[in-house]
């Protein structure tokens, strides 16, 4: 009997706990519902306030419309596409013009600097050698040397507008030839004339002018000088078809140049001077006239006549 009473008491306790949990659950639900109701009521009050203010806002907007219309009417009209295109083209044209002017001014400045440097070098040489001032003839005298190699080495020292990349060992085969003295004189005259030609061209540009037809190339320069040391006929501005187009001829005439003249370090030199007459070894001096760009003449070869199907 006592056992049954204990079980009944235990069951009663469990029911009480269950009812408490359910009561707590419904209490939480009631609180949540109350909070939601308060939130909805707050939203309703806000909407009511907006509705009450609606007429005032509409009146304010209506009063602003005339001002907005007047402000829009006073704005400048947007430019047409064609007008913008014309302005852009004019700006680009001005830019190109300024770029050309800058390029011209840069070239004239560089020419003036080269002319100045050449004049200083020649003045220092005259002071050191105690020789009277002169033009190509005086320079030719300073290039005089007992060997062909010596003439080229003198030019490296005295001729600031000449860049000699030629292999000076190419003179060895010619040094003991019976015509070597004659070749030395003509080589010195050639180098002196090239220096005078480059200086004259630089000076013409430094003065703000353009090099005229008499300075178009070395041959034209020699043709217009009253007492040229180098005869016009000794200057060849191009090679024959065989020499210039054949693989062997073109390869022999592809010679070293400074990289600021050609990034590859090489250039084809078809222009040359007949230092010797037609009979072998008929020495030739091949050069690149870069006076229009760098203001220099590059001597790329001096030695025996290069390959030419007509003469080899």
Image: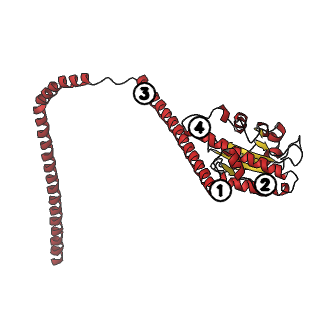
In the picture shown, does residue 24 fall above or below 81? below
Which numbered mark, 2 or 3, is in the foreground of this view?
2
Residue on which the image places disc 1: 129
Q: Which image quadrant for residue 65?
A: top left
Which residue appears at 50% of the width and 35% of the height? 101
Badge 2 marks a residue whose secondary structure is helix
Q: Earlier in the sequence, mark 2 or mark 4?
A: 2
Q: Position of residue 78 (x, y in %)?
A: 34, 25
Q: Earlier in the sequence, mark 4 or mark 3?
A: 3
Residues at marks 2 and 4, CA–CA distance in whole angstroms: 32 Å
In the picture shown, does residue 201 fall above or below 59? below
Residues at marks 4 and 3, CA–CA distance in whole angstroms: 38 Å
Crowding near pointer 2: few (<14 within 10 Å), some, many (20+)? many
Badge 4 marks a residue whose secondary structure is helix
Q: How many marks?
A: 4
Q: Nearer the viewer, residue 161 or 49?
A: 161
Q: Nearer the viewer, residue 234 or 11?
A: 234
Residues at marks 2 and 3, CA–CA distance in whole angstroms: 63 Å
Which numbered mark, 3 or 1, is in the foreground of this view?
1
Query: Could you say which disc has been placed on residue 87 in the image?
Result: 3
In the picture shown, does residue 14 fall above or below 251? below
Q: Are marks 3 and 1 in contact (CB under 8 Å)?
A: no
Which numbered mark, 1 or 2, is in the foreground of this view?
1
Which residue appears at 71% of the width and 39% of the height? 218
Q: Earlier in the sequence, mark 2 or mark 3?
A: 3
Query: Could you say which disc has been placed on residue 148 in the image?
Result: 2
Answer whether residue 264 is visible to the viewer in this image: no
Query: Could you say which disc has been placed on residue 204 in the image?
Result: 4
Which numbered mark, 4 or 3, is in the foreground of this view?
4
Residues at marks 3 and 1, CA–CA distance in whole angstroms: 63 Å
């Amino acid at each position: 009997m006592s056992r049954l009473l204990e079980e009944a008491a235990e069951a009663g306790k469990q029911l009480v706990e269950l009812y408490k949990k359910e009561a707590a659950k419904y209490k939480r639900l009631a609180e949540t519902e109350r909070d939601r109701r308060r939130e909805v009521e707050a939203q309703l009050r806000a909407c009511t306030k907006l509705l009450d203010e609606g007429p005032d806002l509409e009146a304010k907007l209506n009063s602003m419309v005339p001002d907005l219309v007047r402000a829009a009417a006073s704005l400048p009209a947007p430019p047409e596409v064609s007008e913008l295109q014309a302005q852009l083209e004019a700006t680009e044209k001005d830019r190109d013009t300024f770029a050309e002017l800058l390029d011209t001014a840069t070239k004239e400045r560089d020419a003036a600097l080269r002319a100045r440097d050449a004049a200083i070098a020649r003045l220092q040489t005259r002071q050191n050698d105690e020789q009277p001032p002169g033009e190509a003839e005086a320079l030719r005298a300073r290039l005089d040397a007992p060997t062909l190699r010596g003439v080229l080495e003198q030019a490296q020292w005295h001729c600031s507008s000449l860049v000699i990349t030629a292999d000076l060992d190419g003179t060895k085969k010619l040094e003991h030839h019976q015509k070597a003295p004659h070749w030395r004189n003509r080589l010195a005259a050639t180098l002196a004339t090239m220096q005078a030609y480059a200086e004259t061209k630089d000076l013409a540009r430094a003065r703000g002018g353009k090099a005229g037809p008499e300075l178009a190339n070395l041959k034209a320069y020699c043709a217009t000088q009253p007492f040229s040391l180098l005869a016009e006929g000794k200057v060849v501005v191009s090679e024959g078809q065989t020499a210039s187009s054949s693989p062997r001829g073109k390869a022999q005439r592809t010679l070293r140049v400074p990289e600021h003249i050609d990034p590859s370090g090489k250039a084809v030199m078809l222009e040359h001077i007949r230092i010797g007459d037609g009979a072998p070894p008929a020495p030739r001096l091949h050069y690149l006239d870069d006076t229009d760009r760098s203001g220099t003449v590059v001597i790329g070869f001096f030695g025996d006549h290069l390959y030419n199907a007509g003469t080899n």
